[in-house]
Amino acid sequence: MLNSGGAGAGRNLIVVVDDDDAVRDSLRFSFVIEGFAVRSFSSGQHLLAEPSLPPGDCFIVDQNMPGMSGLDLISTLRDRHLTAPAILITTHPNAAIRERAAEVGVSIVEKPFLDFALINSVRRSLVQSSGQHINTQ
């Protein structure tokens, strides 16, 4: 299931993948308010079923989803040569998840999100990946 936050020309596109409707809607709202374009999906399978994968500037992916974990989805995206930064969101990540995320260069932001932890992590990832300022206008 695809939801659009309104993609404006030149704005950074955030792709959100989370099976929880409330979390997905909340993230979409938060990032649109911050000036980002957003596309959201209810599962990794829905994202991968897109005829043309969205050229996201940053992917926010929930770890615990039915059918395909967040890290498995990110690995599949990397296999498809999508190199945009990815941020894994999860509650209480264990050592194995932390280790696997570190191996593939994926940041983890723990739920519940405090202050602007996720938005700040996205901004840092965008700056690091592009070496430029982010564009939200």
Image (spheres, helix red, strand yellow):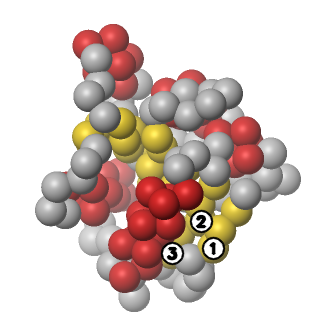
- Tell me whether the residue at label 3 lies in contact with that at label 2, contact meaning CB atoms closer than 8 angstroms: yes
What label does residue 4 carry, if any? 1
- Tell me whether the residue at label 1 lies in contact with that at label 2, contact meaning CB atoms closer than 8 angstroms: yes
Q: Which residue is mark 3?
A: 37
Name the residue furthest top.
96
Please state which amino acid type lies under the numbered disc 1.
Ser
SS of the residue at dot 2?
strand
SS of the residue at dot 1?
strand
Name the residue furthest left.
115
Q: Residue at x 56, y 77 (%)?
A: 5
Q: CA distance from mark 1 to mark 2?
A: 5 Å
Q: Which residue is mark 2?
A: 39
In the rendered image, the vertical position of residue 95 relative to residue 110, given as above or below: above
Give the image location of residue 48, x and y in percent.
73, 42
Please state which amino acid type lies under the numbered disc 3.
Ala
Please state which amino acid type lies under the numbered disc 2.
Arg
| Residue 7 quadrant | bottom right
Which quadrant would the N terminus be assigned to in this image? bottom right
Q: Is residue 2 left or right of residue 30?
A: right
In the rendered image, the vertical position of residue 105 relative to residue 60, given as above or below: above
